[in-house]
Amino acid sequence: MPAARQASRWLSSTFALILRSLGHEAKVVCDGLETTRAVMASEFDLFLMVVGMPSMDGLAATRRIREFERDGFRRPYAIHCATSHGAPEDFERSGQAGADGHLTKPIDLAKLVRVIGACRRAPDGLWQPSPGRSYAAGSARPRATDFQQAV
């Protein structure tokens, strides 16, 4: 197994283990193309998008998912990028790709729990942004520099 795929699988499996220990369901997908296929085949509340995935990185996969949403194929998903890169420009790249947040490794469990808590469903079953954040059609996503305060 190539090193990038192995690292992506390890991080994704770690996220899944944490989510399951918190009582959530989790699906592990370790490749950007597989991720975009999963979007079309299933419903999710949150994507913890590993940036360094093989075949299509997490930023490209995030852009593709946002295209699906804009084209009306999917409801908006909460997407938080996860990477070991935490420089301001990394946060900016995540925001430009359409991510709702950016988590850096090592992942702070309290931040992860807040991210999960912010992904809530409305009575109609659709994802709702956390209070004070609006993603109505045509509205801008938060600036990347807001991610550190939002998470």
Image (cartoon, grey):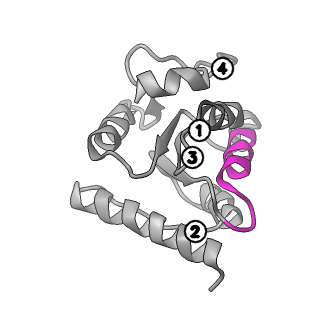
Q: Nearer the viewer, mark 3 or mark 2?
A: 3
Under tag 3, what secondary structure?
loop
Give the spatial CA distance, label 2 vs label 1.
Answer: 22 Å
Give the spatial CA distance, label 1 vs label 3.
Answer: 29 Å
Q: Which label was assigned to residue 137?
A: 4
Q: Earlier in the sequence, mark 3 or mark 4?
A: 3
Q: Earlier in the sequence, mark 4 or mark 1?
A: 1
Residue 141 relative to residue 33: left or right: left
Q: Going 26% across and 40% down the picture, which residue do you hit?
A: 110
Q: Is residue 125 above or below residue 16?
A: above
Q: Going 54% across and 71% down the picture, which residue do you hit?
A: 7
Give the spatial CA distance, label 3 vs label 4.
Answer: 30 Å
**Badge 4 amino acid:** Ala
Residue 141 relative to residue 23: left or right: right
Question: Which stretch appears magenta?
Answer: 54-67
**Badge 2 amino acid:** Cys
Under tag 2, what secondary structure?
loop
Q: Give the camera-side residue of 101 and 127.
A: 101
Q: Earlier in the sequence, mark 1 or mark 3?
A: 1
In the rendered structure, does residue 56 fall within the stretch colored magenta? yes
Q: Is residue 129 visible?
A: no
Q: Given contact means CB atoms under 8 Å apart, are the residues at marks 1 and 3 in contact?
A: no
